[in-house]
Amino acid sequence: MANALLIIDMQNGLYDGPDKPFERERVLGTINQLIQRARTANAPIFVARHTGTAGSPIEAGSPLWQLLPELNVDEARDHLFNKTRPSCFLGTDLAQQLAAKQVDELVIVGMKTQFCIDTTCRVAAELGFSVVLPEDGHTCMDTPLLSAEAIIAHHNATLAGAFVKRVKAIDVAWSQHAQLSS
């Protein structure tokens, strides 16, 4: 089984917006550790940027649309792509890119738990991918009805079994990939 890391929406406008994500520094550190471990295994890394329409705060190229500078992504090596919907698959070539790399398992991390993480996990499972969700590798903000901590706990419980294999990030098992050629 070949796996890949999928990082969703770790962008300036979401991470540093007026409402701060729950445990954002810890989650960023966890994602960076997963990036390092994926690199050691030569596993492909895919990075999604949520892209708004022209004139929106997160339109392509805007400062808020940019990936966090603290995120250890290598734009020359990793596969960056833009999406406009909660699913990383809708309107993108992600499924084709994964097939080209013979990936059948996705490790999904990033933001926001109740939108893009949830939707992408469900769609990936429907498309036949095995999905690993590090329970400590995604985050969101408080809402008027629920704390971010409650939203994360709920989604970890709801997605586990039916859609994802829920693990701690430290327990993600990377399959060894052949050395990637440049």
Image: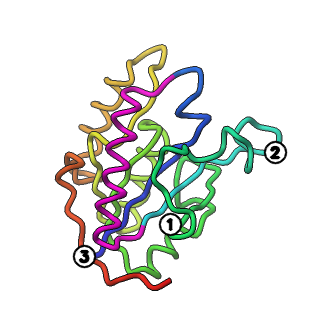
The percent position of residue 82, horizontal first and vertical second, equals 63, 57
Residue contact between numbered discs 3 and 1, judged by CB atoms under 8 Å: no
Mark pair 2, 3: CA separation: 41 Å
Mark pair 3, 1: CA separation: 17 Å
Residue appearing at x 22%, y 54% in the figure: 165
Residue contact between numbered discs 2 and 3, judged by CB atoms under 8 Å: no
Left or right of 21? Residue 80 is: right
Q: Which residues are magenta?
A: 20-44
Residue type indicated by callout 1: Asp
Characterize the local packing of mark 2: few (<14), some (14-19) or many (20 or more) Cα atoms within 10 angstroms: few
Dominant secondary structure, magenta = helix
Identify the residue position indicated by label 3 in the image: 176
Please, which colouring scheme is shown? rainbow
Is residue 32 shown above or below 19? below
Q: Earlier in the sequence, mark 1 or mark 2?
A: 2
Residue 54, numbered label: 2
Query: Relative to the observer, which residue lies in front, 126 or 16?
Result: 16
Of circles 2 and 3, the one toward us is 3
Residue type indicated by callout 2: Ala
